[in-house]
Amino acid sequence: MQKKLSRVYRVRFNVGSLPVFSGETGHQGIRVIEYRKDHWVDNFPLIWSHERQFDALEMNLFLEHRYKGLYRAPKRAARSNPLGGVSLKTMQSIANSLCIFLSWLAEENVDWRQVTAQASTQRAKYWLPVYRFRKFLIDLIQAKSLGRDSANLYMTHVRQFYEWARRRGTIEKLPFEYQQLHIKRSSDHSDINSIFSMAHRSSGITVHTSDLTIPRKYRQKSLPSDQLSPYTTEELSALYGTQYIKSPARRLWIDLALFTGMRAFEIAQFLDVHAVDPSISDVASYHANITGKGNKERQILIPRTLMQRLWHYKNCDERIRRVMKWEVKNGTNSDRPLFINRSGLGISEKSVSNTVIIARKELSLAGIALERSFHDLRSTYATNLAKYMLDKGLEPGFIEFKLMALLGHSNFSTTRKYLNFARAVTFDSEMKGWSDTIFDGIDVRLVGDYQHLLGRDDDQS
C-alpha cells in the first residue's frame, strides 16, 4: 500500500450544538468557538494531512455529521451514541477508509472534486479519481495485500462521502452510477430443518448498488472450515498461565470471549448493569443484551460461574476508584462500562484485543509458541458450543439457528463453518470436560429453547 500521507488521530472532541465565535482568541491567535450545549466525546477520530488540510477538514465535517446523525442516521442508532448517529467504532472504520483515500489523493496529486470526465465515453469515466482509486484497490487485492471485503468497505465509505458532498453542494454531480443487481439465494438447505430454512427459500433479492462495487471475481478464497483456529486445552492453559493475564480485568476479557463468544469491541462496551449479584437467585445462567456489528442487538448467555467473577470485579476497590473518576467526567446517570481504565475512561477495543498479543510475547520468551489471536477465543466458543449441542442430540438446523443468534452472524454460511468443523473433530477427554464446565448451566436454556420450538411445531402440524 502507498506510503501514509494522512493519519487518523483519536482526540477528545466537542460535538456540541449551535457553535458560535465567543469573541475571544486563543494563544495562537485563533478565534475561540463555544457551544450553546457542550457534548464532549473521547476517542473521536479526526483525519490530519499536512498536504491536504482543506480536504481533511471536509472529511472531518462528514465524520461529525455521521456521528450526529445529520446524514445517513442508522435505523438502529448506537446505544453508545445519544445523538442518534453511528457508533465510535463505525466512525473509526469510516475515518480509516477516508484516510487511505486521502493518502492516495495526495500521492497521485489529484482532486477528489473532479467528477466530470473529459469525454462522454464510458471508458473516459474510469480516469476520474474515484474510479482510479477503485483500480488501486483492485491491484492490491490481486497482489494479495488486501481482501475484497475490506476494499469494498473502503469504497462504500468513499461513495457515502461523495453522496454527502453532493447533498451539501460541494460537488455538482456524482461521478459514479447506480445499478440494480439480482442476487440469487442458494436453495441447498438439505442439512437445515424446515423450521429454520423457510425464510431462506426465496429465489433471490434485488439490491440497489453503485458501479464502484468491486466484482466477486476478485474475491480471495475464504478460509475453509478445516483452517479455523480454536484453542486447544494446552494453549488455553498456557494463555491463562501468563503473568500478564493474572490481572483480574484482563482475565475477564479472555473469559468473556471464551465463554460467551463476544468480540473485543463488544467487551470494551460491556455495561456494568449486566453484572448482577448471583447470590440472590439460583439460576444456572444469565443473559445480557449487547450491541454488536452494524448496531445489531443480540442476547448472549453468561454461565453462573462467570457471572460470579464479573460481580466480584464490579465491586472491587480498584474498580470503584475508577468509577468515581468516570462519574466526574460523565455524571452518574450515563451508561457506565464495566471496564474502566486508570484515567476514568472506558477501555478501547485495542486494549482488549492486544491481551493475547502481549501474552504471546511473554510465552515466546519462555520458549512456548502460541499461534492464536484474541478472535480465536470466539472461534473456540463457537466450535465447542456446536460440538456440545451435537453431543446433546440437537438437530443441526437448530444448532445453526442458535449459533447464528448467539454469535450475531448475518448469514448462515459463516455459522455453518463452525458446525462443519465441530462435526469433523473429536475432542479429547480434557477438552470435553472443559466444554462441560463452560456450558453447564446454559444447556438447560438451550435444550429448553429447542423443545419449545419442537412443541410449537407439533401444535401447528
Image: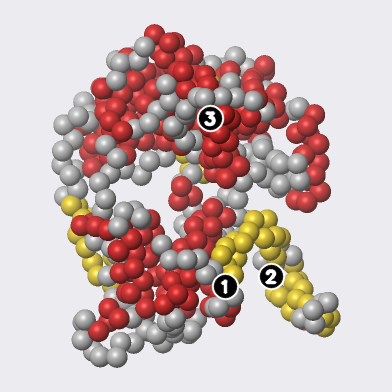
Locate residue 166: give its quadrant: bottom left
Which label's residue is closer to the chain start, 3 or 1? Answer: 1
- Inspect this view and state whether residue 295 appears: yes
Question: In the displayed image of the protein, which residue is found farthest to the top?
Answer: 429
Vertical placement of residue 368 versus 174, above or below: above
| Label 3 crowd (10 A; few <14 / some 14-19 / many >=20) | few
Amino acid on which the number 3 mark rests in the picture? Ser
Do the numbered discs 3 and 1 sit on residues whose CB atoms are within 8 Å?
A: no
- The image's colour scheme reads secondary structure
Quickly name the residue at label 3: 364
The image's mark for residue 249 is none
Q: Nearer the viewer, mark 2 or mark 1?
A: 1
Give x and y (percent) for residue 451.
34, 19
Amino acid on which the number 2 mark rests in the picture? Ser
Quickly name the residue at label 2: 17
Dot 2: what SS?
strand
Quickly name the residue at label 1: 49
Q: CA distance from mark 3 to mark 1?
A: 38 Å
Give x and y (percent) for residue 460.
25, 27
Write the residue at 64% across / 20% down: 308
Q: Quadrant of the N terminus?
A: bottom left
Viewer-closest of 334 and 195? 334
| Label 2 crowd (10 A; few <14 / some 14-19 / many >=20) | few
Residue 277 vs residue 414: left or right? Answer: right
- Inspect this view and state whether residue 395 appears: no
